[in-house]
Amino acid sequence: MRYVSIYTHLGIEQSRRDDIESLGYILIYLAKGVLPWQGLKAKTQKERYKLIMNKKIENKPEILCNGLPDAFCQFFEYARGIQFNEKPDYGYLKGLFIRTLSKINYQNDSIFDWCKHIKPVDLYQNHIPKYNMFDIIKKLESLVKKDEKASQEE
């Protein structure tokens, strides 16, 4: 329930917009390390899910993304604004973060932040990474293209 969209909480059929909203929650979790609805207590699981849903509804993008680059807020505003059947503009969403990384002069060193405390010898001794972040982005782009092609054929 941590990452599901508001529409999913409401029991409404899911679509790509819900995937985008869920991805936004994951990105915020990775950036902040916590989401506002983590640790909510309730007597039953059903009550807890309702508390989580209400917390998601009351946390507008500007509150949820406070302290993060504008790209996060823009991502959420977009995600919550698209319609059920609308195809997300993946290029726009990806561009939000690419422009942010460019503004801060980010250089890809292929070492994830959560791996920086591990010595390179420990990290690669028994495992040579198969992909770096750019390989993953390329793979996602190819999946999006397949999705676009399938949509056009329908």
Image: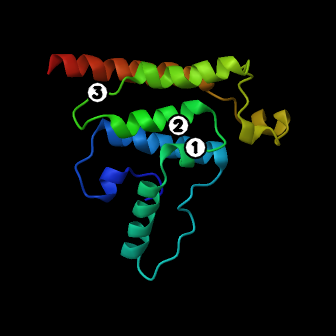
On the picture, is 126 further left or further right than 34? right
The answer to whether 121 appears left or right of 111 in the picture is: right
- Element type at mark 3: loop
Instruction: Tell me whether the residue at label 1 lies in contact with that at label 2, contact meaning CB atoms closer than 8 angstroms.
Output: yes
Q: Earlier in the sequence, mark 1 or mark 2?
A: 1
Does dot 1 land on a helix, a strand or a loop?
loop
Q: Residue at x 43, y 19 (%)?
A: 91
> 32 above or below 9?
above
Q: Amino acid at mark 1?
A: Cys
Of the numbered discs in the image, which one, if any, rests on residue 27?
A: none
> Do labels 3 and 1 touch, CB within 8 Å?
no
List the residue tagged with mark 1: 65
Q: Which residue, given by chain and number where applicable, does mark 2 sit on?
A: 73
Q: Which is nearer the N-term, disc 2 or disc 3?
A: 2
| Residue 127 x %, y % | 70, 34
Of residues 144 and 119, which is closer to you in this image?
144
- From the viewer's perspective, is residue 115 above or below residue 111? below
> Residue 107 location in percent, x, y?
74, 19
